Image (spheres, rainbow, N blue to C red):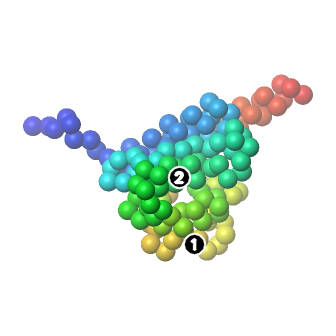
Amino acid sequence: MIDLAAEVYTDEYFMRAAIVEAEKAFEAGETPVGAVIVWKNRVIGRGYNLTETLNDPTAHAEIQAITAATNTIGGKYLTECTLYVTLEPCVMCAGACFWAQVGALVYGADDEKRGYSLVGQNILHPKTRVIKGVLKERCSELLKSFFRKMRENYKSKT
């Protein structure tokens, strides 16, 4: 007999939740990056880019999700948690992951211009496991679509 109540929680499942957050950013005119933090198959923090809305260059999706997650658990360390984010974190966000001691980082698209891996050394916490490329095509297409739309809007105004 099949247990219909049993949910299959995979990296793809939680990346889809991060994509939902990225879509919220897209609709708000923000760069469409979304993040969720998961503990024991439960989302405890969500976030999407709010840098334009808040006029705050630190208001990245990862920072929003880390703040929400640490508020949820009442502590600053996320050693048993996984951060799912649609785009490879920047150096600032990787540093935040370091300080929060995020247990695992799973991301979709590579950030070839500003990703933390461009530094040439691992700046994440030494115990953080990294999985990259989960739903990479969908994450990449969301970003490409956003910037295509931005270029079209710019061209129509000139």
Q: Judge whether 95 appears above or below 53 on screen.
A: below
Q: Residue furthest front?
A: 74
At 56% from the left and 49% from the top, the residue drawn is 64
Q: Position of residue 150 (x, y in %)?
A: 75, 34
Please state which of residues 72 and 116 is positioned toward the viewer in this rendering.
Answer: 72
Location of residue 78 in the rendering, given as x and y in whole percent from the top left corner: 44, 61
Marks 1 and 2, the one that precedes in the sequence: 2
Residue 24 shows in this picture: yes
> Is 106 above or below relative to 61?
below
Please name the residue shown 37% across and 54% down the image. 39
- Structural crowding at the residue carrying mark 2, measured as other residues with C-alpha within 10 Å and reported as few (<14), some (14–19) or many (≥20): some
The residue to which callout 2 is attached is: 67
Residue 52, quarter of picture = top right
Q: Which amino acid is tagged 2?
A: Thr
Q: Nearer the viewer, mark 1 or mark 2?
A: 2
Q: Is residue 8 left or right of residue 138?
A: left
The residue identified by callout 1 is 122
In this view, the residue in front, 78 or 90, is 78
User: Left of 84 or right of it: where is 142?
Assistant: right
Q: Amino acid at mark 1?
A: Asn
Instruction: Pick the residue in front: 34 or 115.
Output: 34
- SS type, badge 2: helix
Q: Is residue 76 left or right of residue 147?
A: left
